[in-house]
Image: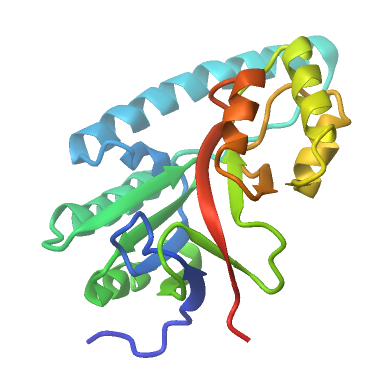
Amino acid sequence: MISQHLPFKAVVKDQLFYGRFEYSIGFALDEVNCLRNLSHDQIDIMIARRIAWREVAQQRWQKANNTFGNILTRRRKDITEKTSEDLHALAEILLTATVDFKLVVTANHAHVYSNSLELIDQLDQLDCLSWKTYAQAVINRPRDTIQLRNPQHQFRSYFKNVKLTTEQKLSIKNFLYGQESIRISPALETWLDGAFLRTGDYFFIDHNEMSWLTLLSLVRSGLIRKTQQIIPANK
C-alpha cells in the first residue's frame, strides 16, 4: 500500500526534475556511490576494492601514529557485511523496477527521481536509508523562465563552471563593471572582487538584450551555460 502522508516538499520550477520526473526521494547510505553503475556484481567489485584500499590506509595510519605519536584520527567508517547487504537491497529494488527512474549518487548520499509513488514508497520502507527527504516538482511558469516580483530586466544568464586566467578574469571584471544596464548577482560580484579564478554555475547576470551576450563573448567566449526569460511573479 502506498503511503499517503510522505512529507513531500513542493519545489516550484519551470519544468519537472530532469525534464521528466515529478517526485524525488533523497537519503543517506554508506558507500552508496558504489551504485553509480547499477549492478550487483559492480557492488561486490567496488566493496572489495575499498576494503583492500582501507586496509592499506589503516596500516599507513598505524605506522604514522607509531612514528609521530597519536596525532592522526580515522575519518572513514568500516565497511561491514551489513554495508554490502544494504547496498544490494537498494540495488535489487531499482534493478527490478518496471518504471522509469533516475539515480543520482554523491559519496554517501543519493536521490532517486521518478513519477512512480509506488517506487518512492518502496524506497521509503527500506530501513537502511536515513536522513530521507521528499520533493515534488510543481510547475508554476513556462519553461526556461524565472519569476521575479518586480523585474527590472528581461533576461537572466547563468555562467558555466570554468577556470580562467588572471588576465581573463580582469578583462571580464572591467567589462562588467563598465556596463550600466545590467545587474550582477551578489555571488558573482564577490567573485569579481576576490582572488579565485574559477567561476560558479550559480553566478548570473540580468540584462535586457540577447545581443548583449555577443559583447560578453568577445571578452571571453563560452562563459554562459543558459539564459532564461524573466517574467513577473503572480501577485
Left or right: 110 in relation to 185: left
Q: Residue at x 58, y 82 (%)?
A: 234
* Chosen colour scheme: rainbow
Q: Is residue 160 visible?
A: no
**Residue 148's spot in the image, x, y percent?**
65, 69
Report the side of 58 relative to 51 (left or right): right
Name, please, the residue furthest toward the bottom. 4
* Most foreground residue, 25 or 123: 25
Up/down of 180 relative to 6, above or below: above
Q: Quadrant of the N terminus?
A: bottom left
Residue 118 vertical placement versus 96 (above, below): below
The image quarter containing residue 100 is bottom left
Q: Is residue 235 left or right of residue 12?
A: right
- Judging depth in this view, the residue of 14 and 211 nearest the camera is 211
Q: Does residue 134 show up? A: yes
Between 34 and 76, the one nearer to me in the picture: 34
Image quarter of residue 144: bottom left
Which residue is depicted at the point 30% across and 75% down? 121
Quadrant containing the C terminus is bottom right
* In this view, 24 is above or below 61: below
Q: In this rendered view, identify the residue nearer to me: 38 or 92.
A: 38
Residue 82 appears at what percent x and percent y?
38, 50
